[in-house]
Image: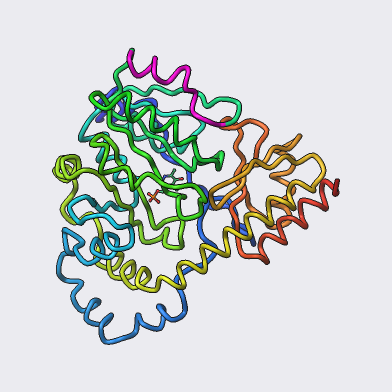
Amino acid sequence: MINIKGLLRENIKPLKAYEAKEIPCKVKLDANESPYGISSKLLANLGSPKSQRLFGALNRYPDPEAKFLKKLISRDLGVRLENILHGNGSDELIYYLITTFGGPVLYPIPTFSMYGIIAQAIGERRIEIPLNEEFDLDIDRIPGAIRKERPKLIFLSSPNNPTGNCFSSDRILKIIESTSSLSIVVVDEAYQPFSSKKGFLPLLKDYKNLVVMRTLSKIGLAGLRVGFLIADAGIVNEVDKVRLPFNLNSLSQAVAIEALKDRKTMKSYINSIISERERLFNELAGVNGIKPYPSEANFILFKTEDPDRIYKGLLKKGVLVRNMKGVVDGCLRVTVGTPEENTVFIRALRQMLGSK
Ligand SMILES: *Cc1c(COP(=O)(O)O)cnc(C)c1O
């Protein structure tokens, strides 16, 4: 009998498969998805002759360069084609970055779990530096850790998942400047469309060690799996060497192109989420025993006395949120939904805790 465990690489042995359990619920506010899918206009277009040509061409491989999609992104973000690399979600691009440059990989915690999971899967060392009390970068510890450990890659999610805040741009800049000859700094801007703060795309021309990541997942197209990395062509060309040739399938490319062309609809969905986030924050602040943290993203982290009880109570009422136990103790994270969904959530919470 073959001993499968005996064949495993050492770094794979302690890993567990990523759990994305499907928990039945009426109102799903646990995964930072957009409550708005593709518009009915786009849906109708999928029956058009153009779409039928696409479906008829599924015997062919997809465009390995995703030319048309990248052209749209290039226009939307104001960056050149040669500075963009497309991924099957930004998750895949994190994989490619660590495959290309290796470790150690440094990131603050709590943050997006994939940086650590992928580093471990590839067998690279992880350096985790806790955020300070304000959920900002600990500027007393990070420079020292960089000098001592010499990380090849530094991942900064800003706005940060799960805390919702942007890190101070001065601190991010300080890190980019102080490591310019040592490390690549990846600013993961998955939630930038919801943020009032300036992103880092304008700084790409000044810093050759800066990478910015964007994704369509949080703005209504999580099911398509489309992400982008934007960086100096020197970096893009190296990461492109490890990219699987057909990483972005034809249907995802085609639907993403149609969705992005309708900028007005995309923008109106984003604006609705931003204004609902502000309402949700104020309502949360008015519930007994709840402390919401300000957010620049499409979700809100909040503290409560008995998070397990509140989590279960909400689920009983059909509302699924994320329990942050073990990540940010004492906290739950709620994604901003439609106005109706948010009202159901707030009403359920008030029934359990009462108003201030
Ligand atoms: C959700 C999320 C992503 C998205 O990854 P995709 O693979 O593009 O869906 C990336 N970074 C952060 C910080 C996230 O929270």
Q: Position of residue 224 (x, y in %)?
A: 36, 61
Please give the name of the residue rendered at 21% of the width and 50% of the height, measured from the top-left corner: 83
The magenta segment is: 135-147
Compared to residue 323, the image places residue 151 above or below, namely above
Give x and y (percent) for residue 50.
25, 83
- The image quarter containing residue 247 is bottom left
Reply yes or no: does residue 21 show up in magenta.
no
| Left-right relation of 103 to 309 | left
- Asked whether residue 141 is in view, the answer is yes
For the point 17% across and 64% down, the residue is 63
Depth order, front residue of 290/195: 195
222 or 85, nearer to the observer: 85
Q: Quadrant of residue 67?
A: bottom left
Q: Position of residue 190 (x, y in %)?
A: 42, 49
Quadrant assignment for the C terminus: top right
Residue pictured at 73% horizontal, 43% vertical: 310
Name the residue at the bottom extreme: 49
Q: Position of residue 21 (x, y in %)?
A: 52, 48
Q: Is residue 124 visible?
A: no
Q: Is residue 41 above or below residue 38?
A: below
Magenta segment includes 142: yes
Colour option used: rainbow
Quarter of the figure that contains the N terminus = top left
* 241 versus 265 height, above or below: above
Q: Is residue 148 above or below residue 200?
A: above
